[in-house]
Image (spheres, rainbow, N blue to C red):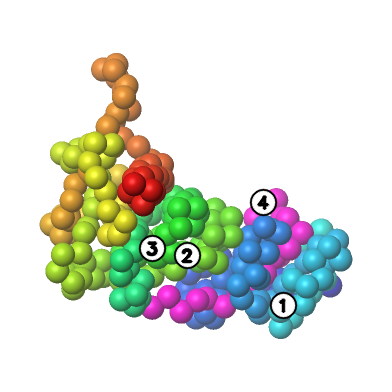
């Protein structure tokens, strides 16, 4: 059985202020919770008897295990459709280090606001083996429940750090390649791409800020193949991120196999 105070506490964690004060976040569903438990221990797991019976090793990786009915889980859940298990985890120490980007490919997000987009980009980074995402301070909170859910567990494998992005880019070693997609960029399908650098993706409506744009070294274009006058004028930021990451990795693989 779950107490009213515990339900109230879980609901409070839907707010960034409460998550920050407690240093925790909420994850839900067997896939997301299971992936995070593989990497770290939970503070609290609230789960049905069915989930606990099917996942005894995971159920043991917590400081507190609360068994609930489906009805009780629905009262605690932050989702419209609860999925057997909810867990509260400590937030990671995502302090940036030089090793996070040294000779690696990283993603930087400048003002990405939609939680679904951020969660999807984290999942995309995980798929393409990119382990670091650097976010501007006005990018959506990685521990927003909608972001966590959209990552489908990839939040456990990708470091997401927040910083003054322009200041961070300005302090990078000379020669660091900083890429961005722009309409006046070079066709991404026609140029060689390195195995390392930082890919900047901008705000859904306004793109990359002028301050950050001034620090871009290489501009890339994802060309449209539509021929009608009324074609789409832009791509969703998560979709664009997937295309860019795929092309970087594809050309790295070709270069490695030459």
The label number, if any, that marks residue 158 in the structure image = 2
Find out whether the residues at labels 2 and 3 contact each other: C-beta distance under 8 Å: yes
Query: First in sequence: mark 4 or mark 3?
Result: 4
Secondary structure found at label 2: loop
Q: How far is mark 4 from mark 3, CA to CA?
A: 29 Å
Q: How far is mark 2 from mark 4, CA to CA?
A: 26 Å
The N terminus: image quadrant: bottom right
Query: First in sequence: mark 2 or mark 3?
Result: 3
Q: Is residue 82 magenta?
A: yes
Q: Position of residue 198 (x, y in %)?
A: 28, 59
Q: Which residue is mark 1?
A: 61
Rendering quarter of residue 13? bottom right
Q: Is residue 175 above or below residue 200?
A: below
Q: Main secondary structure of the magenta part?
A: loop
Q: Is residue 190 above or below residue 3?
A: above
Task: Specify whether residue 221 is in view.
Answer: no
Q: How far is mark 2 from mark 3, CA to CA?
A: 7 Å
Q: Is residue 39 left or right of residue 165?
A: right
Q: How far is mark 1 from mark 4, CA to CA?
A: 26 Å
Number of marks drawn: 4
Q: Residues within 10 Å of mark 3 (few under 14, many from 20)?
A: many
Q: Is residue 78 above or below residue 255?
A: below
Q: Position of residue 133 (x, y in %)?
A: 38, 63
Query: First in sequence: mark 3 or mark 1?
Result: 1
Over which residues does the magenta segment extend? 75-95
Q: Which residue is mark 3?
A: 133
């Amino acid at each position: 059985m779950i107490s009213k105070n515990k339900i109230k506490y879980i609901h409070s964690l839907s707010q960034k202020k409460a998550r920050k004060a407690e240093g925790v976040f909420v994850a839900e569903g067997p896939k997301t919770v299971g992936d995070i438990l593989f990497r770290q221990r939970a503070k609290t797991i609230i789960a049905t008897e069915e989930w606990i019976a099917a996942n005894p090793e995971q159920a043991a990786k917590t400081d507190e295990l609360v068994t609930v009915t489906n009805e009780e889980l629905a009262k605690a859940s932050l989702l419209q459709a609860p999925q057997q298990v909810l867990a509260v985890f400590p937030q990671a120490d995502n302090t940036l280090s030089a090793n996070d980007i040294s000779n690696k490919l990283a993603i930087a997000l400048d003002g990405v606001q939609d939680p679904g987009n951020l969660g999807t980009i984290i999942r995309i980074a995980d798929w393409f083996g990119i382990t670091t995402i650097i976010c501007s301070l006005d990018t959506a909170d990685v521990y927003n429940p909608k972001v966590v859910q959209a990552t489908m567990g990839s939040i456990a494998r990708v470091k997401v750090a927040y910083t003054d992005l322009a200041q961070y880019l300005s302090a990078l070693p000379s020669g660091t390649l900083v890429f961005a997609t722009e309409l006046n960029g070079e066709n991404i399908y026609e140029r060689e791409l390195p195995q390392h650098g930082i890919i900047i993706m901008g705000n859904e409506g306004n793109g990359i800020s002028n301050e950050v744009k001034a620090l871009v070294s290489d501009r890339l274009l994802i060309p449209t193949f539509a021929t009608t006058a009324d074609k789409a004028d832009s791509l969703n930021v998560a979709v664009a991120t997937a295309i860019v990451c795929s092309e970087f990795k594809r050309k790295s693989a070709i270069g490695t196999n030459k």
